[in-house]
Amino acid sequence: MTDQEILRELANAYMEAANEPVNAERRERAYATNGLQAVRPLVWIHELPWHELNIDDALTLRCEGALAREIEQFLRRSLLQWRYFQADMILEPYYPVSMCIHSTGIGFQVIEEVLVGDDKNNIISHSYKDQLDSLEKLEILHNPVVTRDYDEEKKRVSDAQALLGDAMPVKLCPQNMYYYAPWDRVCRMRGMTPLLMDLAAEPELMHATIQKFSSVLNADIDALNAVNAFGVSASSLHCTPPYSRELEAVEAKEGPSVHSAWFRALAQPFGEVSPAMHDEYDIQYLLPIARKFGLCYYGCCEPLSDRIDILRQIPNLRKVGVTPWSSVEVSAEKLGKDFVFSRKPNPAMVATTLDEDAVRKDIAHVMEACLRNSCPCEFVLKDISTVGYKPQNIIRWAQVAEETIDRYY
């Protein structure tokens, strides 16, 4: 078979699944959840160890061309997940093409040593060289120059459509969010220990550090907005459903811009500092930037249940991450009807031997707390670095999660 024949066969199967009515039902639930309605929560599964999931050789690429293989990988992964562990995944009826955005960057460059446990896995251990241990070294950071190549975008869409033909539409998709994580970047330029030590011992240096980072990232946002990079898109909001009637309404009125996009903010190293320090060194610096965006989603792997009151300062905050290290009860009580309880189940549950009772208990605990407090809720299993080469772990996790939610809806 030629590349075109392979892709069109896969695309036909993908479009058949994408046109199933369940996608529309799930999409409406996502709109409702992000609109702060306490409907049946969606269960999404992202950040997968695909090298461990090649069931019946279904992920093996057979195309020869580089673009064809890129499209083939998207289709094969989507179809495998749909068949075996779709949970509440939503298939959009088109092939997404990203905008062609070029940036000079902000001077951020990691110098590190790595330790690899599985050479097929991109999850590895890192040891970072400290590059920002003085005020003078902050001068390495600078505002970016951002450009957009419209001709290349047209070519990407045209080339993809030539391969897919009538089997599947192709759509150019904007960025639906800005990923704002300055402290995660500082950690990668310093290492965790120097960062935490200097937060306590060198406040002048650390305030200067976040001032510099927030300034150049703000300039990056303005530069992206100037080339119309932002807008409503169904691409995942860092592994979670992005669907929002409010953002769509803004875009319909004003056109695509930063105002119709999500502000995706986090400070994972700050899981190790006090709420007051978190407020001083992170929240206060992001407030003027967050105001540019339509909606905000805060939190990743850091526990936040003891500082939700501080997060309430963030304008247009809509969604808050609730990790395995957060208190479910406290989070539900403090989030209430005001924010989406974005639950991140522990990926360790699927890493070795699946304990189905533990999964049921975890899902039920969240469901009961959220129902008691009228919390809009979603479940997002992510950061799955391994399933121990046992795909059945994740297949069964999805089944058990949905079965447990069935008891409540």
Image: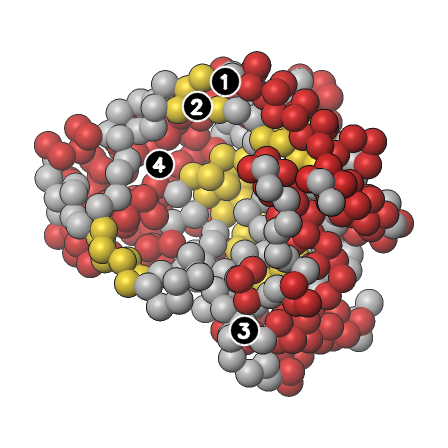
* Dot 4 amino acid type: Tyr
Q: Which mark is residue 401?
A: none
Answer with mark 2 or mark 4, whichever residue precedes in sequence: 2
Q: Are marks 1 and 3 in contact (CB under 8 Å)?
A: no
Q: Callout 4: 10 Å neighbours few (<14), some, many (20+)?
A: some
Eye-nearest disc, 1 or 3: 3
User: At 61% across and 20% down in the image, what residue appears?
Assistant: 155
- The residue where tag 3 is placed is 389
Q: Is residue 406 above or below residue 262?
A: below
280 lies left or right of 167: left
Q: Callout 2: 10 Å neighbours few (<14), some, many (20+)?
A: few
- The residue where tag 4 is placed is 285
Answer with mark 3 or mark 4, whichever residue precedes in sequence: 4
In which quadrant of the rendered view does residue 349 lie?
bottom right
Q: Is residue 120 above or below residue 101?
A: below
In the rendered image, the residue lying farthest to the right is 21
Q: Which mark is residue 102?
A: 2
Residue 244 horizontal/vertical position (percent): 70, 38
